[in-house]
Every structure is written in C-alpha cells, then in structure tokens.
Image: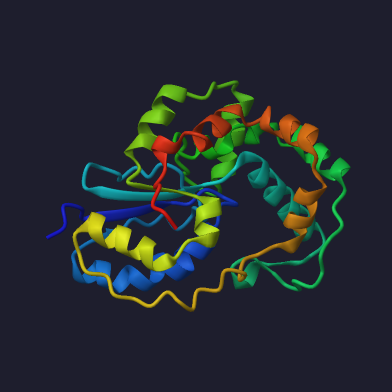
Amino acid sequence: MSKYNKIYFLHIPKTGGRFFTKYILEPISETLKENNISVLTLPKNVSKHGGWHKDIDENTYIISVFRDPVEFFVSATAHIAADEKGLVDEANDFIIKDEESVLDIKKEFLYEKLEQLKYLKNFQSNNFLLTATEGQLLQEARKAYNKNIDLDTKLAYERIQRVNLMIRHKDLRSINYSLLINKISEDLGIDIDIDVSSADREHYKNSSSEVLFDKLNSEDKEKIYNNFLFDKEIYENNSLFWNKKI
C-alpha cells in the first residue's frame, strides 16, 4: 500500500503543464484510483492553476514543473500575442489554431509586457505561496503586488522542498517518459503500466515563442532575469530538481 493517498500536480502556467496532464497524469489516473490514491482537483470556479492547494498534507505526493524564467516570460508574451490575433483555441485546451502561423513578435512588444505585467515578478515561485479561491491565480498575484506584499522566500523554499517530484521544463521536453513513469511508480509504491511512446511533444507548441526567444541577446535575457531573480535562483538550484539521467 502506498504511503500517499493523494496526488497533486501544481500546474504553473507556461511550464508544459497541459502536456504533463494529457500524457502523464490522465493516463495513470485509473491506476491511481485502483490504489486508493485520489487526485486533488481545483474548485469549479478556479482555472487550471490553483497554486498551493489547501488540502495538501503529509500524505500528498506533489509534482510540479519549473521553467527557465526567460523562457517562461517569452512563452507568456507569445501566448498573449497569439491570443490578440485570435489564434488561441480556448475550446481545444488552448492550443494554437494554426501552427503554421508563426508570429513575428517584436522585442518591443516583449519589453512592453515586461513593464505592464509587473505582478508576474517571480511568478513561478509565487505559485507555491498563493492559493486561488476563484478565477485565476493571476488575480491573486495581482492582488499581492498591488498590496506590496513581499515574496516570502523562506516559505517558498520550504514548500518547493516539500515537492516530491520537481521537473525542469527542458527535461520534460526531452525526457524518456518511461523513466518519469517509473519514478512516479517507485515513489508511490505502486505498479504503473502505461505506454507513453505516443506522447506528442509538439502538441502544445507555440513556434512563435521559439522565434521570439531566438531574437534575444544576452543583454535582453539579463533584463528579463532581473524581474525574476528568485525564480532564477530556484531554477539554478539542482538540489530542488529530479536529476535522473535522461
């Protein structure tokens, strides 16, 4: 019997969470149920991103994915640009409607968003501090920013260290997924037998994000990092992440 009776995927925006849910979490859900492990879900009035779930306890197995802060913000910017062009298919899990339509996003647009979205400062880390009670976690981040509430770095570290399986986004993109399934299986102490060979690594891809990222020089990246210094600190701390060879 597993020592865990709950599993929670702390889905940070723009970190490959939809991919992880579709190709990893959903396929193993029946096996989890058979082993009396429930998946913590969000309230109906909360979107995909719930932050630190109120029902997390010592028997909860927590998974999350964390992304390089520059890649994170570039991806967020590209998503905004695609949404403004009507290319985001909200009815189909927010995939890009026409992947052939690669947008030429100017760096000026990215800097404009960097200035406008100040409340996204260290947003990935904030996902471990905030809890969405309704709507989107972004609303909670905006409230905290408007109230000048400083990021509690000590608590953030404690909660991130509590995560059982922290994956870097770059590894999620390239990993042999059978290794990931084996890791979850071993940690939970249950047999998970699913075929993940058909996982489509390109399904949620926004090529415009890659094109924009390639435009950035070291000075551009440094300016973005300066808005996400704690996120960068977390991302570069190898001790916080699963380091299985892939």
**Residue occupying the point 60% across, 21% down:** 148
Q: Viewed as shown, does residue 204 lie left or right of 129?
A: right
Q: Residue furthest front?
A: 245
Q: Is residue 237 visible?
A: yes
Residue nearest the observer in this picture, 118 or 44: 118
Q: Is residue 77 above or below residue 129?
A: below
Q: Viewed as shown, does residue 161 lie left or right of 114?
A: left
Q: Quadrant of the C terminus?
A: bottom left
Q: Quadrant of the N terminus?
A: bottom left
**Residue occupying the point 78% across, 50% down:** 214
- Give how far across and how far down residue 30 sits, in percent: 29, 73
- Give how far across and how far down residue 33 sits, in percent: 24, 69
Q: Is residue 178 above or below residue 120?
A: below
Q: Is residue 116 visible?
A: no
Residue nearest the observer in this picture, 90 or 153: 153
Q: Is residue 129 above or below residue 193?
A: above
- Give how far across and how far down residue 149 sits, in percent: 55, 22
- The quarter holding residue 28 reads bottom left
Residue nearest the observer in this picture, 28 or 83: 28
Q: Viewed as shown, does residue 109 lie left or right of 58?
A: right
**Residue occupying the point 68% across, 51% down:** 75
**Render colour scheme:** rainbow
- The quarter holding residue 85 reads bottom right
- The quarter holding residue 73 reads top right
Q: Is residue 36 above or below residue 43?
A: below
